[in-house]
Amino acid sequence: MDAAEEHAHEHEYVDIAEGEMVSAYAEGIHETVTLQFNQKGVALMLSYEEALELAEVMRAVKEHCESGGKQLA
């Protein structure tokens, strides 16, 4: 199967969030989330499963940063 047949469907992109440094958008058909680090020119494409795991890790990072770097119980 060539690439044209593989992608004969329409892709629909949904903006999730946009910040000065990072933007996120989803593509529903392939169930991917892309994180784009604007100033660095880097983009990560993640499956929904990977995005959910990253969200849990980033929640812990957020708490760490907000605590001033102190270890949380």
Image (cartoon, grey):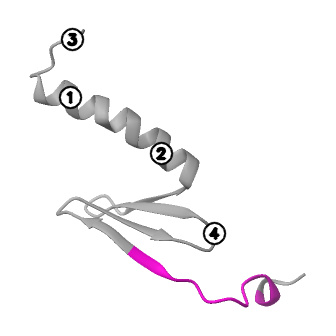
Whole-number angstrom distance, CA of label 4 to CA of label 3:
38 Å
Give the labeled residue for mark 4: 30
Asked if the residue at tag 1 contacts the one at tag 4, i.e. Cβ–Cβ closer than 8 Å, the answer is: no
Q: Which disc number belongs to residue 26? A: none
Whole-number angstrom distance, CA of label 4 to CA of label 2:
15 Å
Task: Report if residue 12 lies within the magenta region.
Answer: yes
Which residue sits at x=22%, y=13%? Answer: 72
Asked if the residue at tag 1 contacts the one at tag 2, i.e. Cβ–Cβ closer than 8 Å, the answer is: no
Residues 6 and 42: in front is 6
Give the labeled residue for mark 2: 52
Asked if the residue at tag 2 contacts the one at tag 4, i.e. Cβ–Cβ closer than 8 Å, the answer is: no
First-in-chain label (4 vs 1): 4
Q: Answer above or below: position of 8 versus 18.
A: below
Q: Answer above or below: position of 50 versus 12.
A: above
Which residue sits at x=21%, y=59%? Answer: 21
Residue 71's image quarter? top left
Q: Which residues are magenta?
A: 4-14
Q: Which disc number belongs to residue 71? A: 3
Task: Report if residue 31 lies within the magenta region.
Answer: no
Give the labeled residue for mark 1: 63
The amino acid type of the residue labelled 4 equals His
Residue 52 placed where, x, y %? 47, 45
Whole-number angstrom distance, CA of label 3 to CA of label 1:
10 Å
The amino acid type of the residue labelled 1 equals Glu
